[in-house]
Amino acid sequence: MDLNLVKDNIDYEQSIGENSQDVVIKEEYVIPDTLPDVSDVLMLNAKPLVVNKEVMNGKVLVEFEVDFNILYMNKEEDNTEAHAVNYTTKISTNVDADGATADMNCDSNVDIEHIQCIIVNERKICIQGVANIVCNVIKKNTFEIVKDVESDGDLQFLKQPMILDKVIGSFEGEMIGKTELKIDMDRPEIGKIIKYFITLGKKEVRLYDGGIHLECVANLQVLYKGKNSKEIICISENVPITKELENDKIKNGMEHNTDFSVHSFEYDIKEDDMGENRILDIEFLVKTITHVMAKEEIEMIEDGYCPTKMIKMDKEEFNINVIQGQNQIETLAKGDIEISDDMPKPSKVIMTTADVNITDKKLMDDKILVEGVLKADVLYSTGDDKEYLACASDEIPFSTTIDIDGAKIDMDCICKLNLEMLESSIEAGNVCVRAIIKGYGIVSYPIKQKFLVEMDVIEGEIPQKKASVTIYVVQKGDNLWKICKRYYTTKEKILNINGIENEKDIKPMDKLIIPGRAVI
């Protein structure tokens, strides 16, 4: 008897654990000769970006950059003016990861937990802070199973349906945003670009047969200093961007989640028809990574035999990852930043920036409890000629839940949050900040499962028949498969000879006619 084994590869990803590490940031910088001395630091923004990650035995090497933007005041006898300076530092560190090996992948993220700028002297500043690196090391497993067997013999199989979470892949994309901002005539010309801030909102990801549709709206804020003026102006615009990623592996209805991040920002100041610097050409890069999974139902071969031949079935036990569920959330974080008596009173909000950090996450029955903090900085004008600018900063805590049916405390979870919308206003002398935060959570757990990996016909005869007919009394715990395998016959023969239409009608103490008993 010839056997043709139909095999299939099972691919899945399994997290071996999430690890985090704090890294101290301490850098000293000299103010460029083209800029005046530093008197007060108004605003410090730090943008971290992972540029490289490498999984090694027992650890992960993470390399990241932090772009610092410092807005400061220069005070002289008859003049007070704001200026901006930018610096970049590169940092590398090793994050311990027990069980990690070089063939594994890693999802890394860097959050700035604390940052401050200290004036060393009028020409030097020191930036101090703490960055938290989180690494989720992912083991990609592949094994081959026997999905079906084609044969010219009378093989009998017991099959059970099983749903597997198969990893289709992680698909990276690049979206280019472009816009041309024109400065109105009632505002000063562009003297110098001080800073920018981009919030990616209205994200939509849609899978279709053969590709991924990506779109979002980038809310762009650009802060500039007026030409021959000390005035600081913020201009903003919503820039819609879309992208199509083609890939034959992708099918409509697959499960997915996508991360968006801004990676570069370039601008060019141009003159208008009047010869004034009132046109700003902007181009920025948004990178995406879409993780695609699919639940595939297979008929798993649990047992088998042949009434006429002896067969050998080899099974192996594998650890597989089961995704209990995933869900997206949207939550509101809001709070007042109190303006103390020693701070200038706000007159008008100029620009608001913020970061979102997860401070804790906890699995509970049917949900993930997520706690986070919104770190907001609000630059505002005061109406005072001398101290005409000030900045209010605070951390606004929030909590939210991500509903996942069937989630349990001993399972594993991954959560990510991002800023969707940000606005602020002046209310009762304080600054009110309001943000919409979106994110997703995935809950999974490992199980051990045996799969058929090989099957062969072996030499030897099946047990000889001793009687032409046997009467068998069905015992508690019996089923038709067990009875057929024991007596080397088939379901069809027993059902036909006993006049039974449905095997579910067989119950304990029933008497079945067996056509020829095997001697065991």
Image: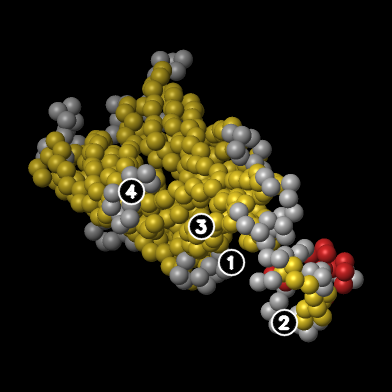
In the picture of the structure, the residue carrying the numbered disc 2 is 475
The outermost residue toward the right is 499
Find out whether the residues at labels 1 and 2 contact each other: C-beta distance under 8 Å.
no
Q: CA distance from mark 2 to mark 3?
A: 31 Å
In the picture of the structure, the residue carrying the numbered disc 3 is 316
| Mark 1 vs 2, N-terminal side | 1
Of labels 2 and 3, the one closer to you: 2
Secondary structure at numbered mark 2: loop
Residue kind at label 3, given as amino acid type: Glu
Secondary structure at numbered mark 1: loop
Name the spot of residue 310 as percent of width and height, x first.
64, 57
Secondary structure at numbered mark 4: loop
Mark on residue 361?
none
Name the spot of residue 496 as percent of width and height, x first.
87, 66
| Mark 2 vs 4, N-terminal side | 4
In the picture of the structure, the residue carrying the numbered disc 1 is 405
In the picture of the structure, the residue carrying the numbered disc 4 is 101
Mark 3 crowdedness (10 Å alpha carbons): few <14, some 14-19, many ≥20: few
Q: CA distance from mark 4 to mark 1?
A: 33 Å
Residue kind at label 4, given as amino acid type: Thr
Image point 63% across, 46% down: which residue? 5
| Mark 2 vs 3, N-terminal side | 3
Mark 4 crowdedness (10 Å alpha carbons): few <14, some 14-19, many ≥20: some
| Mark 3 vs 4, N-terminal side | 4
Quadrant in the picture for the C terminus: bottom right
Name the spot of residue 362 as percent of width and height, x first.
43, 67
The outermost residue toward the left is 121
Residue kind at label 1, given as amino acid type: Asp
Can residue 50 be seen? yes
Q: CA distance from mark 3 to mark 4?
A: 23 Å
